[in-house]
Amino acid sequence: MKNTTLNKSLYFFVLLIAIHLVIYNGTNKSVYASGRHDVSHKILNQAYQTANKITDVNSKANMLCKIAITYKNIGQQKDALKLLKQAQKTVLSENGKDKDQTLSIIANTYVKCDLYKQAEIIAKDVDKNVLSLNNFFTIMTEEYIKTGKYDQAFAIAQREGDSIYEIIACQYAKSHQWEQAFNTVNSIKNDSSKSSTLIFIANEYINVGQIEKASILLSDALTLTDSFNINNDEINKYDEKLRDTYHDLYIGSKVSALADIASVYYKAGQKDKVLSIFLCKIFMSQFFEERQIFTYSPYRV
C-alpha cells in the first residue's frame, strides 16, 4: 500500500514538472535563445531522476514519454530518442497486461518526436486493435502529411483502409488541392466514409466562395446517404447482445450524415434544403427510441 501511494505521488510530481516545461517552452521560446537552455536541462534531468524511482513499469514509461516530448520541443531530439528507448525497454522487461497499451503510447510519442521509423518498428509488435484505439494510424498519417510525406501516408491507407483515405482527402481539401482530394475520395469504398468526406470538401468550397461546386458535392453526399442500408449479414456476425448496438450505429451514421449535410447547406445559404433534410433526420431518429448513438469522425463538419 505504501509503495502504491509513493508511485502515485512520484507519477503526479513528474507529470507536473513535464506540464510546467511544456507551458514554459510554448510561451517563452525567446528564453531559450537568450541563454537559459541549461536551466531547462537541469529541470528535465530532475524529472528524469524522479521518474526512475517509479516502480510500476507502465507508469514509468508514460512519464518518460512526457519528458521525451518536452526534450523534442526544446530541440533535443537525441535525448528524446534515448528516453523513448528506455521506456520501450522498461515495458518489454515485464510481460504485463497493459504492455500493448503502453507500447502504443510509446509508438505515438515516437511519431510526435518525428521518429517515424522507430514508431513503425515498435508498432509491428503491438496488437493492431490497441493501436487503432489509441489513434496511432491517424496520428502517423497526419504527421506524414504535415511534412509532405504523402507517399508514406498513402502506404498506411493501403493497409488500413477508408478511415485513412478520408484523412488524406480532407487534408488535401484544407490546402485547396481539389484534384488530389477527389482522386483520394475515389479510393474510399464505404459509402458512409465517402459521404462524410464529400461533406467536408463541400464545406471547404464554401469557405472559398465556391457555392455551386459545394452544392453539387452536397447533392452527391445526400444521394450516397440515402443509399445507406443496414447490413443484416454483418450485424448477425456479432453476439446477440451487441446486435442492437450495431444496428443503431448503422442508423446513426445516416442520421449524422443528414445532420452534417443540413448544416453545410444552411451555411451555403440554401435554406430551402434544410427543412426536408431535418425532417428526414427526425424520421430516422424514431428508430432510436430516443437514444442518441452517433458515429464519430474527427473530420465531420
Image (cartoon, grey):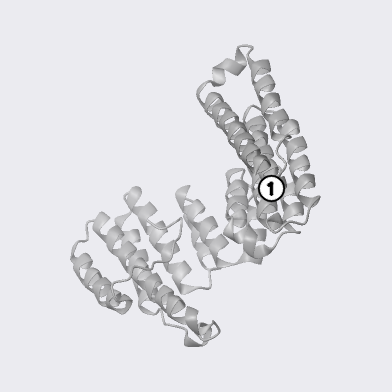
Pick the residue in front: 280 or 198. 280
The local secondary structure at tag 1 comes to helix
Q: Which three-letter amino acid code belongs to the residue tagged 1?
A: Asn
Taking the image as drawn, is residue 170 in sight?
yes
What residue is at 69 percent from the left and 47 percent from the top? 58
In the image, taking residue 153 as reference, residue 243 lies left or right, namely: left
What residue is at 34 percent from the left and 68 percent from the top? 292
Q: Give the residue at the far top of this rendering.
A: 34
Picture coordinates of residue 293, whole percent (x, y): 38, 68
Disc tally is 1
Taking the image as drawn, is residue 113 in sight?
no
Rendered view: 75 above or below 148: above
Specify few, some or many for label 1: CA neighbours under 10 Å numbering under 14, 14-19, or 20 or more. many
Q: Give the residue at the far front of this rendering.
A: 1
In the image, taking residue 229 as reference, residue 58 lies left or right, namely: right
Pick the residue in front: 176 or 2. 2
Picture coordinates of residue 125, whole percent (x, y): 76, 59
What residue is at 69 percent from the left and 38 percent from the top? 64
Picture coordinates of residue 253, whole percent (x, y): 40, 70
In the image, taking residue 301 as reference, residue 29 lies left or right, namely: right
Which corner quadrant holds the N terminus? top right
Rendered view: 8 above or below 49: below
Q: Quadrant of residue 157?
A: bottom right
What residue is at 77 percent from the left and 45 percent from the top? 90
Rendered view: 39 above or below 276: above
Which corner quadrant holds the C terminus? bottom left
The residue to which callout 1 is attached is 58
Picture coordinates of residue 169, whole percent (x, y): 51, 58
Pick the residue in front: 80 or 59. 59
